[in-house]
Amino acid sequence: MTHPSSGEAVAKPSPGGLGRVLDQRVLLSIAVLALLPWLLPSKALAVNVLIYGVVVMGYNLLFGYTGLLSFGQAAFFGAGAYFTGIAIGRYGVPWFAAVPVSVLLSTCLAGVIGLVSTRTRGIYFSMVTLALAQLVYYVALQAASFTGGENGLRGFTVDRISLFGLQVNFLDPVNKYYVLMVFGALAMWFQSRILNSPFGAVIEAIRENEQRARACGYDVERSKLVVFMLSGAISSLGGCMLALHLSIVPLDILHYQTSGMIVMMVLLGGARSFFGPFVGAASFLILEDVISLWTPHWQIFVGAIFVLFVLFLPRGIWGTLLDAMGSGKARR
Amino acid sequence: MDLSLIIMQLLSGVALGAVLVITALGLTIVFGMLGVVNFAHGALFMVGAYAGLYLASLTGSFWWGLLLAPVLIGAFGMLIELVLIRRLYGRSIDDPLLLTFGLSYILVEGVRIVFGSDGIPFPTPPQLIGVVDLGIGFFPRYRLFVIVLVAVVLLALWLTLEKTRVGLIVRAGARDPTIMQVLGVDIGRVWLAIFGLGVGLAALGGVLAGPMRSVNPEMGSLVLAEAFVVTVIGGLGSIVGAVVAGLMVGISISMVALFAPEMATIVMFALMAVVLLIRPQGLFGVRGRTA
Amino acid sequence: MPKSGSTWKITRRAALAGLSASAALLAAPRLGRAADETIRIGFPTPLTGPFAAEARDQVKCAELAVKLVNDEGGVAGRKVELLVRDDKLNAGEAATRTLELIEKDKVHAVVGALSSAVQLAVNEVTRARGVIYVSISQSDTINEAKDFSKYTFHEALNPHMTTAAVARQTLKKGMKVAHLVADYAYGHEMLRGFKRAQAAIGADNVGEILHPFGAADYSTFMPRLMSMRPDVLCISNFGRDQANAIKQAVDFGVKQQMKIVVPVILHNQRLAVGPDVFEGVIGGANYYWGLEAQSKSAAAFNAAFKAANGGAIPTDYGAYGYSGVASLLLAMQAAGGTDTDKVVEALEKLKYDLTKGPQHYRKCDHQSVQSVLVLESKKKSAMTGESDLFAILASDAGSEDMLRSCSELGHAT
């Protein structure tokens, strides 16, 4: 299954000039995110945009760049959150250690789910990822002594952290935002590195034409599994951020409706663009907030907007903007 | 554990499976012949239930609701295909999935706006109230009716596809649409009919399920996951697969409920994972069809 | 430093100034809530989702409580404002809304929550920040030491109280009892309550079947349930699950063989399913408008609600909205303002009678000690009007014996 190429060059990793441009996109993105709490009407909204932006960015690696439409990303988002909460609350692991441990465990989960789902192709893949993620949901519901079950996970509030000797009040929304932004920046840097690497070229080749990629000698199955795990890792980092931010992990973070929301965000923002995920997350959350003020029936508007985007703006907001700004540039 | 309990449980499983079959059938037919996965399938199931209820209360009879709702919603489905899905042919294979996903949001919220968020009772038709004494236990008359009706619908479907000219065109159109067009068949009309049929079957499932569970806007979401699981196990595009898988899943859930009822829902996902590991294209699916 | 070639010259001095300004901003003490005139109360409730009707009832009653206080001049001369937010019955959403209410809207207290998960999420946010929270969600968990906070008060009933009251009314020594239980925390709490009560009465437990939470189809559990031949079937689930389970049990002819009993019988569920299916089902409740025949407080509450809402009657969940907010406002009145510690003290000492009789908060776990109603759903022909849904079988006066002991919950006594 292919996405028709829109005349855009598949990124080739190259040193020098292009390298500087591509690093710049990380810096530019960080700059925008740093201003976000002051641009948006509430800090809680800004943190949500940051968190979901990271989750969607990870998903973008899988869907936008590799062309694999998974409906189960919520499993890794949730795994990141739950592992972090359990590590801090149940095992007393300090927060800065809980995050990498959690990402590691979530990546393993992604490996297991990836093993089963990458055996399938096309539409099967979408349906299988949905069903497997739903299995994770039911397991989490059952394992209530670990996860809190339906009540969600609580009891791991991080209120004070020490950064290089300074005592920082983590409950203060501004402090919290900038601490979490560091994670966001790390995730962005990591994603950029992947996209720049030869591997980044391989996954785009797979999206363009899987048969051809295989004919060129690339191990398509292994690459799909690897990108599945990397995508899960980044999204799980978003989950860790959520756990630290909310101090609870709600069970419905694992439900396929959360996966659906992630899909909507990536499409709204622009799949296969670097900053698109954040634009998509921001658009979706702001839209939801704004429309909820007028009517409790915000879902019908969000659904309609999404349908219109699929029909007429498949490149998403940011993607369309980038296209308009010039199609010759080797930008992403 | 005595034999009569096991038989009763099996019968329960078949009744459960019957609803799963009807729902999964619509999904698999549309995919098999059009290559479109309808993410709004669960929502249309729900809309069918509401339509059945509304028509039943309008006409005063459940039977009119049962007959007309699938036809009406099937027609609505044809409209969706004409206006929305048709624009997406030739584009990425994911686009119809995404579009129907957005559509499901619209349908669910639309029903909430019109009928409210609370559940509405769907009264069992008076002719089917009560239990039948099977000698080994009591079984609800209505559920027996569901089993029988689904069997009848399956038979009718099979006869149409295998024995009639219309069925021939449909089957050939699934095999090779281009040749059909060359032969002068309006393939657009065939697709319209198929999509309508798939949606109509979903709506029929909804109307049948209505009296068994209360009718509410969220009833489609679990059904969607179930339909996905059943079609994946059976093999996307395979009618036989949908029937076998639906019954298999229904009976498995039912038998597991005897020993570990809380695991009943997990079982169907576990079954799917097992089938995928052994045979990724599903029990009756054809390898490579979805690439 | 290499020449950047840009037209901006960021001098070291300017950079340092900028940095120290940001550091000052980060380290600035949290602006205390200014002694505004208005008292703001946050009210998260699931306006979208399956309990939208209950949520709307709650909002109407909460607004009534606020209106009545404002009509009398407010609390210590200050007007009260209710900030209603939609938590979409989603714990994550509720936590986000609560954060906004505290950080952006600077509320003085939070009242609300319908589901157990939402209540615990709100609680986690409020207790870390020392904000008063009056929960009106029916669950046992919030009483336990793990989730306790001195700022949190539980105004609603819990499964322990309701199951005990219902059991007292329906079970007799030697009766055979079977259970159908939703397999999640709330379901288990209800089962535990029933089993305790049934053991105390001397009834026999003939079996328990757990069903997946949110299950739509109960047909696979019916044959086994019927084969146990119980006298009473206790269905421990909630909301739509309960409606579905009862309906399907009735389809299988269960009512011919046994009595169906539930811990909490919901007003709106009964309306959703209809009198025939629910006929004869017995369950507990915190409030029913029919109580006005026995209680002056109920009559007064009904009258006030009818006056403000065009003759409509308040529902069970609505009453929670009223008593949650009203009891908080009474405490604020006693404390003379919104000083958190003073209000907490006032709540602990408060004796109130708002909708059904005397109530107070127990000191160790802040649980509201109150009466429990036991209701039986009337058959269609016995209903005198479309609101005449239930017959009140009992209205046990509130007492601390109804609750689990402080030590059992993990509190120091």
Image (cartoon, coloured by chain):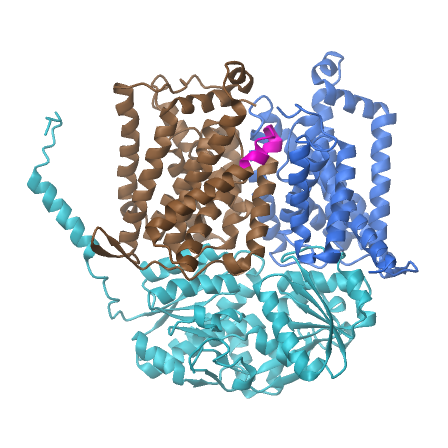
**Can you tell which chain is drawn cyan?**
C
Question: In terms of depth relative to the viewer, which is nearer, A61 or A308?
Answer: A61
Which segment is the magenta one? A114-125
> Does residue B100 appear in the picture of this structure?
no
Percent x, y of residue B80: 64, 34
Residue occupying image coordinates x 46% and y 24%? A203
Judged left or right of residue B222, residue A113 is: left
Q: Is residue A103 above or below residue C268?
A: above
Instruction: Label the magenta part by its dominant secondary structure.
Output: helix
Residue C182 position, x and y percent, is 64, 62
Residue B96, relative to residue C357: is it above or below? above
Q: As rendered, which of C340 and C76 lies closer to the eye?
A: C340
Which quarter shows the C terminus of chain C? bottom left
- Tell whether C140 sits left or right of A187: right
The chain whose colour is blue is: B
Is the residue C294 above or below the residue C389 in the image?
Answer: below
Image vertical order of residue A239 relative to residue A204, above or below: below
Residue A240's spot in the image, x, y percent?
Answer: 40, 48
Task: Tell me, yes or no, whether the highlighted magenta stretch contains residue B6.
Answer: no
Q: Is residue B101 visible?
A: yes
Q: Nearer the viewer, residue A192 or C375?
A: A192
Query: Which residue is at a point 40% across and 55% down the rendered structure image?
Result: C96
Task: Choose top left, top right, bottom left or bottom right for residue C388.
Answer: bottom right
* Residue at x-position 72% and y-position 39%: B24
Q: Based on the picture, tell me whether residue A118 belongs to the magenta stretch.
A: yes
Q: The N terminus of chain C lies in which quarter of the figure? A: top left
Q: Residue furthest right?
A: B135
Chain brown in the figure, letter: A
